[in-house]
Image (cartoon, grey):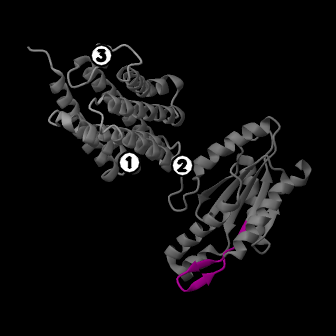
Amino acid sequence: MPPLDAATLLMVIAVIDAVACVVWLALGDVLRIAPRASRRISAHHGLLALSWWPALPASMERLVGLPLDLVAAGFLTAGARALTRDRDNARDIIAIVLLGVVAVACTAGDPDPDRARAFSNFIVGVLALMAARDVAIGTGFRIALTSVLVLPFVAFAIVCIWRTATLLGWLSPAYVLAGPGTNVPLVMLILVVDVTMATGLIALVIQRLIARVRHLMRRDALTGLLNRRALEEHLARMQARTDRGRRNAVLVLDVDHFKRINDELGHAGGDAALQHLSAVLGETLRDADCIGRLGGEEFAVLLPDTDLDGALLVAERLRDLLQRQPLAWGDKIWPISASFGVATMRSGDANGHGALSRADAAMYAAKARGRNRVLSAAGEAEFA
């Protein structure tokens, strides 16, 4: 069997990139998995398929091939950034790509294309390092797995920068760093790096998908707040801190006259009332606080590092805020209020369930005393 030549390998890379382009586009636009990142990575593979296709004449390298490589590298870096959610501002990437295109264009009068190739390789290397940085920071994997994902980007960057130095005459020419059109080892290296980078990015997509499923499992479908299971997990962690001497508090609230809201506005209006409450209360809490739906029209707020007086102030502020922001439903303005029960967590409680029960009892006592008020649990003064 005759050995593979560079042109055949380049065609194989082009086909792989063309298939990857379609796959990533399907992930983003059909399955709606990380659509922004998927479209960028799809564009990266599509442009590379055009760039590597052997039928492209050598005379078009400076005009088409090198700019395609630069733009493709920019899309890859922007896609990795969007995928890792590090930051989605791509202005620095666009600026670097434009700088590379201008640098290549400035060599138009130079009969030797090596300077243009050097500029292109250097910019692509810089972009690969930027992608490696974003992947390293944003993956959320353990160090060993993150290192595996980062390695092909770093290797690709090193090869590009090494080729830059070789093309500019700063290093002695090496066969492995000659042009890919006639260099089988270099094309094999490109193939391996291309496949490993694509595999790593697929792993990041799978991670995003798993994270989304976990997020949905912990959220209430109607309000988007934490569900009861997630609240109890947070409550157990707060209880562990309480057992170590920290002060924590729990609020339980229930919408007043919710049946009347459902009767007057219908179930859609009742759902809107719960969503309205969630939006109003969620905006005023600290980042460390947790708010979730226990079920029906009953909610809980977990307040870490908060004593009884602080929790009562928070509850009163939430009650007043909700009262001052009625629900606008159709052509009606419907007042919304809630009754609040407050309890502090005590050492030795079983996963904090005792505090939740005391706050729940205080909430029902607030309803019995006329609703739209805040009450602390019985006996709280002894532990304040």
Q: Quadrant of residue 128?
A: top left
Identify the secondary structure beneath mark 3.
helix
- Residue occupying the point 44% across, 25% down: 154
Which region shows up in magenta? 326-339
Label 1, label 3: how far apart the Cα atoms are = 38 Å
Amino acid found under the numbered disc labelled 1: Ile
The percent coordinates of residue 142 (x first, y second) are 52, 27
Say whether residue 331 is magenta. yes
**Residue 218 as seen in the image, left or right of residue 191:** right
Label 1, label 2: how far apart the Cα atoms are = 19 Å
Q: Decide: few, some or many residues near mark 3? Use Cα within 10 Å; few <14, some 14-19, many ≥20.
A: some
**Residue 261 as seen in the image, left or right of residue 339:** left
Viewer can see residue 31: yes
Amino acid found under the numbered disc labelled 2: Arg
**Residue 98 as seen in the image, left or right of residue 227:** left
First-in-chain label (2 vs 3): 3
The vertical placement of 88 against 134, above or below, is: below
The vertical placement of 20 against 181, above or below, is: below
Amino acid found under the numbered disc labelled 3: Val
State the residue position of label 3: 176
Label 2, label 3: how far apart the Cα atoms are = 52 Å
Marker disc for residue 33 = 1
State the residue position of label 2: 218
Say whether residue 367 is magenta. no
The percent coordinates of residue 104 (x first, y second) are 35, 38
Q: Decide: few, some or many residues near mark 2? Use Cα within 10 Å; few <14, some 14-19, many ≥20.
A: some
Closer to us: 168 or 313: 168
Mark 1 or 3, closer to the camera: 3
